[in-house]
Image: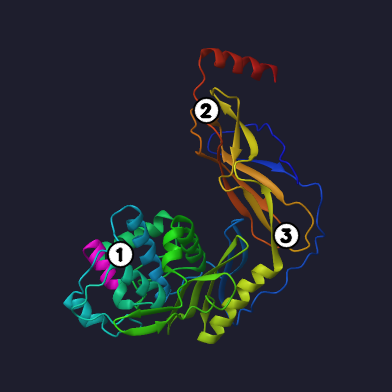
Amino acid sequence: MKQVRKARLRFGLAGVLLSAAIQATAQQDAETQLPEPPAAEAAPIAMLYDMNSRQTLFSREVDRRFAPASITKVMTTFVAFGKMQEGELDPRQRFSVRPETFKKWNRVGSTMFLAHDDKPTVNQLLHGITTVSANDGSVVLAEGAAGSLPKWLNEMNAAAQRIGMEDSHFGSPNGFPDEGRTFTTAHDLVTLGTRLIRDYPHHYQRYYGKRQMRYGGITQNNHDPITGRLFGADGIKTGFTNQAGYGFLGSAMRNGRRLVMVVAGSDRGWVRNEAARDLIEWGFTNFDVRRLFARGETVTTIPVQNGSLRDLPLIAEDGVAVSVLKDWNAEPEMTLRFEGPAVAPIKAGEPVAELVITSTGTGDARIPLVAAQDVAEANVAQRIRNGFLSWVD
């Protein structure tokens, strides 16, 4: 395995991104070709992302806006999971169905058939949203948890901005057609799916990937095209509108490797379903993960100004892995990027730099690097020592 050279970086003006190339000695044949993914006719919008390596394995029209329809409900669960994590929402809480809500959403689109006098628990509402795409359950949860629909929508849009969904807006908690106020992109949905799984793994496992739900004496099936049909698949959410066509945000994990995918704009449900299955199988079949650095292993070091240490070791909290085409034998090219100079004090775990990894057939992987230890401000003796060593260097 290639080891990173400890490069002594020279700093320019503060705020300028610096690059220290860590070049591989072996090079792969430039004519390496990637097998074809599902065609654009089946999925006009498509993206496949490897959560382990943080690489995009395939992309098509990923910044094109479209109406997510019921995939919107993933953001509703994301906000709810956050509230549960913070203790602001309890799965055992019960919310009443407001008369206005019942009148508007009773048996409209996909529902969990909430009655006018029901008082479902948060747990039941979340299962209704994730398993049977309950339009009524989404609104009841939003109104009950936030006090009003506008307040819930504010929280959805604030969460979207916080996690980097820069080209999305939510005008409803369930994605029902709303004259274009709700829109997103494949890139943003992959961001949402990745954060949902990474930030709330226990809630994701509890509420997503269920094939059936029974509520009020009625049993309904999940329309997820991959869960229960492909090995390792466990979600996430389908969507359909006449305007946008059929879409799907999905995920599967095999042997510790998790892929997140979006297909959208398909003109038939079965076409969307086949495209989704084909795309995720394509990713697992044609790529391998190569681990470069273990969790906690030093990736490189950078110099520190005015610190108790001259050189700060950097680590990736989850280690560093890269997705490569199967049978691709060359080492990837790695570049360290950060805003300099690094100035003490620095706390252990503080984000300091970014490792950019380039390999044939995939998009760049961008791995955050953090300080491996605290670096205090230098005392007088350390400043003298640092000055002397800098002069000697």
Task: Point out the frontmost of discs 3 and 2.
Answer: 2
Disc number at residue 360?
A: 3
Q: What x and y, as percent, mark residue 61? A: 56, 70
Task: Point out the frontmost of discs 2 and 1.
Answer: 2
Judged left or right of residue 168, residue 44 is right
Q: What x and y, as percent, mark residue 82? A: 36, 57
Query: In the rendered image, which quarter contains the C terminus?
Result: top right
The magenta stretch is 139-149
What amino acid is at disc 2? Val
Closer to the N terminus: mark 3 or mark 1?
Answer: 1
Q: What x and y, as percent, mark residue 227? A: 52, 75
Label 3 to label 2, Cα distance in Å? 37 Å
Q: Nearer the viewer, residue 32 or 10?
A: 32
The answer to whether residue 149 of the structure is visible from this angle is no
145 drawn magenta: yes
Residue at 30 percent across and 74 percent down: it is 137
- Classify 194 as above or below 245: above
262 drawn magenta: no
Closer to the N terminus: mark 2 or mark 1?
Answer: 1
What amino acid is at disc 3? Thr
Label 3 crowd (10 A; few <14 / some 14-19 / many >=20): many
- Residue 173 picture quarter: bottom left
- Classify 171 as above or below 105: above
Judged left or right of residue 69, residue 27 is right
Residue at 54 percent across and 24 percent down: it is 307
List the residue tagged with mark 1.
Answer: 153
Disc number at residue 375?
A: 2
- Classify 372 as above or below 50: above
